[in-house]
């Protein structure tokens, strides 16, 4: 999510995000440079939304009294992080039965992958990644207020959540800690931790932490791993081996999700497949490596719908008979605004402009083609937070209808898909979704067996 742009595509963030604790340290350092934090010994942080890499961030001082300070980090006008400092009695968090089943040394960069069951009662210790002098150099003003060891302890909480508990599939939700006296802080003594509760319904992990500099509670979520589509063998059991013989399917966005599943359906039915990817080359090649050894025809092509269509599709060695248009940006967006100019522009570019460009390309070369346009039930159901998405999809439907009547060589096939099980629809709380193959397979059959235009 933080370090690998390709892997981040398959998380709830949808793209690389900064470490939440880094945002907190930056905010506290900025505040410390303006005013002393003497006496503020309690910190509560709530991570409300992801902050994307290179996103402009606004630091707001929302409220300030003699005993408390409230700050917010905002992106595009929406609050991403809430930071509350207080002067309060030091809370006593007692760590029981820390058996050091997980010991993470300073140079250890391994990321653990735990199931919910494995997280129950997990405990251990994590040594800070660097000495106090490194934290003092990076955050001099904050270190002068709470101590460099405490700064290191805060930073170590990010390692705790991201590397150990929950580990690989984690989202930092909240922390509540007390700072101990600077005089009692011991450099690189490590942070001890113990998971106290694991809520299986909400996949929420509560963890008590303690060191010579900080003590408190961390809450994080154990997110679901990336969605795995059915194997080719599983798909082949549902498809006749000659159902799609003679078809050449160009699948725009075929490296994962519905595009990957469509590739397996067409290949299992004897059709030839051309997968495109924008950034997920390894994912596309993974699908190819499953199809080709089984005797299927599968080519892989780099194609970015935002680029020049003619130049990119000039690399095709096969003439497509069918196109599946699964290109999409991140669907579920953060923010409280009903309408976002930027989000609307991005959705419109993917679902309208770029869709038109590919249809226009094949119409100009007079290559008879059937194009599958996957719309969404969100157009009619209008779920909260999806206004811009729904508007772009309905515009795409209108365009697809007019392409069908106005482009001699292109036939369009429009279907509104329900919420299906993909990386895009993954959530922490289990949401009812339909099995993608149960929905797609009948549509693909209807699409392939319909009459093709002859332009």
Image (cartoon, rainbow, N blue to C red):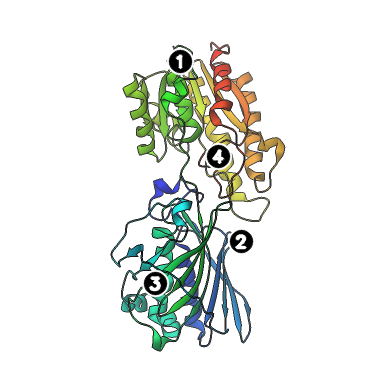
Classed neighbour count for the residue bearing mark 2: other residues with Cα under 10 Å, few (<14), some (14–19), many (≥20): few
Q: CA distance from mark 1 to mark 4?
A: 28 Å
What is the spatial separation of the Cα atoms under label 4 and label 3, in whole angstroms?
Answer: 48 Å
Residue on which disc 2 sits: 77
- In percent of width and height, residue 155 lies at 41, 70
If you read the primary sequence from the N terminus, does the residue marked by circle 1 or circle 2 appear first?
2
Distance from the alpha carbon under mark 2 to that under mark 4: 23 Å
Q: Observer-nearest residue: 158 or 280?
A: 158
User: In terms of secondary structure, where does tag 3 sit?
Assistant: strand
Residue 428 in sight from this viewpoint? yes
In the image, farthest residue toward the front? 97
Using the image, tell me which numbered label, if any, was put on residue 349. Answer: 4
Q: Which residue does the numbered mark 1 point to in the structure image?
A: 247
Would you say the residues marked 3 and 2 are in contact, meaning their CB atoms lie under 8 Å apart?
Answer: no
Residue, x 71% and y 36% (percent of image)? 380
Residue 327's spot in the image, x, y percent? 50, 35
The residue closer to the viewer here, 80 or 161, is 161
Q: Which is more N-terminal, label 4 or label 2?
A: 2
Q: CA distance from mark 1 to mark 2?
A: 48 Å
Q: Nearer the viewer, residue 435 or 377?
A: 435
The reply to whether dot 1 and dot 2 touch (C-beta < 8 Å) is: no
Looking at the image, can residue 315 be seen?
no
Q: Nearer the viewer, mark 2 or mark 4?
A: 2
Distance from the alpha carbon under mark 3 to that under mark 1: 59 Å
Q: Which residue is mark 3?
A: 191
């Amino acid at each position: 999510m933080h370090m690998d742009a390709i892997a981040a595509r398959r998380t709830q963030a949808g793209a690389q995000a900064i470490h939440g604790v880094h945002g907190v340290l930056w905010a506290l350092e900025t505040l410390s440079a303006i005013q002393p934090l003497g006496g503020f010994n309690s910190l509560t942080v709530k991570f409300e939304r992801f902050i994307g890499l290179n996103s402009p961030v606004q630091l707001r001082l929302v409220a300030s009294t003699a005993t408390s300070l409230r700050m917010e980090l905002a992106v595009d006008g929406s609050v991403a992080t809430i930071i509350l400092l207080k002067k309060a009695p030091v809370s006593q968090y007692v760590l029981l039965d820390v058996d050091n089943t997980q010991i993470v040394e300073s140079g250890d960069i391994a990321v653990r992958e735990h199931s919910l069951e494995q997280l129950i009662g997990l405990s251990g210790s994590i040594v800070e990644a660097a000495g106090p002098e490194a934290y003092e150099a990076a955050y001099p003003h904050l270190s002068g207020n709470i101590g460099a060891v405490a700064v290191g302890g805060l930073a170590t909480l990010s390692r705790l959540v991201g590397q150990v508990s929950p580990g690989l599939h984690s989202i930092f939700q909240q922390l509540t800690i007390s700072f101990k006296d600077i005089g009692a802080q011991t450099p690189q003594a490590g942070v001890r931790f113990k998971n106290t509760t694991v809520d299986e319904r909400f996949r929420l992990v509560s963890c008590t932490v303690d060191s010579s500099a900080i003590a408190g509670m961390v809450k994080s979520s154990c997110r679901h791993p990336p969605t795995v589509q059915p194997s080719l063998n599983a798909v082949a059991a549902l498809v006749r081996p000659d159902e799609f013989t003679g078809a050449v399917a160009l699948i725009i966005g075929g490296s994962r999700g519905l595009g990957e599943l469509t590739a397996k359906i067409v290949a299992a039915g004897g059709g030839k497949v051309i997968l495109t990817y924008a950034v997920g080359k390894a994912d596309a090649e993974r699908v190819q490596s499953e199809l080709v050894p089984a005797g299927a025809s599968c080519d892989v092509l780099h194609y970015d719908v935002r680029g020049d269509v003619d130049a990119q599709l000039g690399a095709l060695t096969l003439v497509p008979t069918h196109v599946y248009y699964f290109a999409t940006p991140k669907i579920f967006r953060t923010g409280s605004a009903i309408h976002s100019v930027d989000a609307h522009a991005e959705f419109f570019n993917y679902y309208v402009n770029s869709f038109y460009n590919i249809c226009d390309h094949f119409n100009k070369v007079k290559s008879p083609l059937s194009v599958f346009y996957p719309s969404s039930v969100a157009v009619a159901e209008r779920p909260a937070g999806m206004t811009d998405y729904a508007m772009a999809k309905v515009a795409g439907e209108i365009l697809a209808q007019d392409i069908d009547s106005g482009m001699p060589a292109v036939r369009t096939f429009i279907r509104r898909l329900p919420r299906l099980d993909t990386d895009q629809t993954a959530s922490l709380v289990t949401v009812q979704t339909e099995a993608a193959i149960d929905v797609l397979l009948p549509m693909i059959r209807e699409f392939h067996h319909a009459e093709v235009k002859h332009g």
